[in-house]
Amino acid sequence: MTEMLDPGARRAILEAVDALRDDAVHTLERLVRCPSTLGNEQSALNEMARIYEGLGLAPRRVPTVPEQLASHPGFSPPLVSYDGRDNVVAVFTPRERKGRSLALQGHVDVVPEGAADMWETPPYEPAIRGGRMYGRGAGDMKAGIVSYVTAFKALRLAGLQPAAEVQMQSVIEEECTGNGALAAMLALPRTDAVIIPEPGPGLPAMYSAEVGVVWAWVTVSGRPAHVRDMQAGLNAIKAANAIAARFEDYQAEMNKAERIHPSFRGVNHPVNVNFGTIEGGEWNSSVPTRARIGMRVGVMMGYTAAQTKADIERLVAEAAQDPALKGATVKLEFKGFMADPCVFDMHAPIVTMAKRNFADVSGGFLRDYPATGLTDGRFFTLYQDTPVACFGPDAQEIHGIDESVGLESMHDITRTIALTMAEWCGLETA
């Protein structure tokens, strides 16, 4: 085990983080201005390459190639082309490898802003109010990325650097497939531990477990007609809604107490089925020809994404046989998440070290957080058996209107990562 930090080094690192506080806020502002939704991540990836260069590291582009990943159990069917959207990584190498290696990973992609007119300030124009920065992606998870790069920068400012390899990974598609994380993980050597500064549930927390997720798309083609002959038509939107209704009983079944993993005991309704998109119809006075609905189905431990996929296929096939859908064509596709659930090792040294350092710098504590969503942490745990400490700043309204992150909380996470990196990797003079 690496020895506890020298008190002088610890003090120098914390003073350096404090000195970089304004710099971190400005870096976050630049990242939030990048509208890095699915397929538009280039600006944020380019910004990360500049940030890595500013740390004295050589950024490297890692492409996401479905043909190379398709046989991996962590692969998910892609939604869009990967051309021009390569992940960006950088690797720090010490003069002498004495400590344990570490990967610092975060995703640059953000979910769509929704109704921009409902935001108090525009979603990609960062605004600070009441000690919080507002903007899409500020919390999920650009503040976490800024924390890890600032932590590394602080060590250097203190005249120190890690005495072990440190990887930095900026990836795409955490919000829909995780294929960017999979590509970056496979392109680099396995490290002794991983830190992912993903935001928790709006309070200080360490991810202890996370559900799996399957995305599916159902397209119903009905029979168009003029509204005056409505009974002669088959309304594709109504038919799609009838299929969606089939999943209410399934959701209730999957949330029965005997199905819930011990990690999620006490969590209300951990397995969620969400119908997140619908598109269809041509004209208010025409019976709609076609409707497409997109769903997200949670997967509890003890169950797999493959089993959930089979359940979706069965339910949709049963719905298609309903007399009310006679004459309709039903098509089912799987694109996006095909992710298995994951339990993180809460006794792993990287986890206990991060918890201790957080308590020391903040006076609070990171509570265990079983998440009803998912992170890229699953790849390292499920497919590399690498311990993951997944914890991040106080983010609110992620995926919602007026998303924000607490800047004091971001500072605490930066200090925690800096001390944990120093202690985990060991130190040498810069």
Image: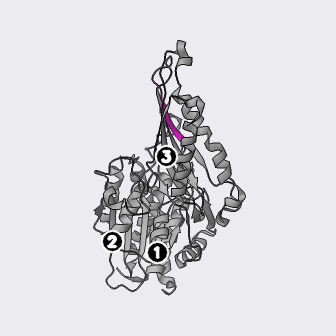
What amino acid does circle 2 point to? Val
Work out whether residue 305 or residue 135 is closer to the camera in this orientation and state it: 305
Q: CA distance from mark 3 to mark 2?
A: 36 Å
**Residue 392: x percent and y percent?**
53, 62
> Residue 320, image x and y in percent?
54, 37
**Mark 2: few/some/many CA within 10 Å (<14, 14-19, 20+):** some
Q: Is residue 151 above or below residue 273?
A: below
Q: Quadrant of the C terminus?
A: bottom left
Residue 24 lies in quadrant: bottom left
- Say if residue 132 shows up in the picture: no
**Mark closer to the chain start, 3 or 1:** 1
- Residue at 38% x, 78% y is 161
User: Circle 2 sits on which residue?
Assistant: 91
- Specify the segment rendered in magenta: 275-281
- What's the coloring here? one colour
Q: Amino acid at mark 3?
A: Ala
- Judging from the image, what secondary structure is the residue with disc 1 in? loop
Q: Which residue is mark 3?
A: 216
State yes or no: residue 278 in magenta.
Answer: yes
Point out the residue furthest to the top here: 228
- SS class of the residue under badge 2? strand
**Magenta-colored segment: predominant secondary structure:** strand
Q: Amino acid at mark 1?
A: Ala
For image coordinates 57% across by 53% down, the residue present is 298
Q: Secondary structure at mark 3?
A: strand
Q: Is residue 428 magenta?
A: no
Closest to the camera, between mark 3 and mark 1, is: 3
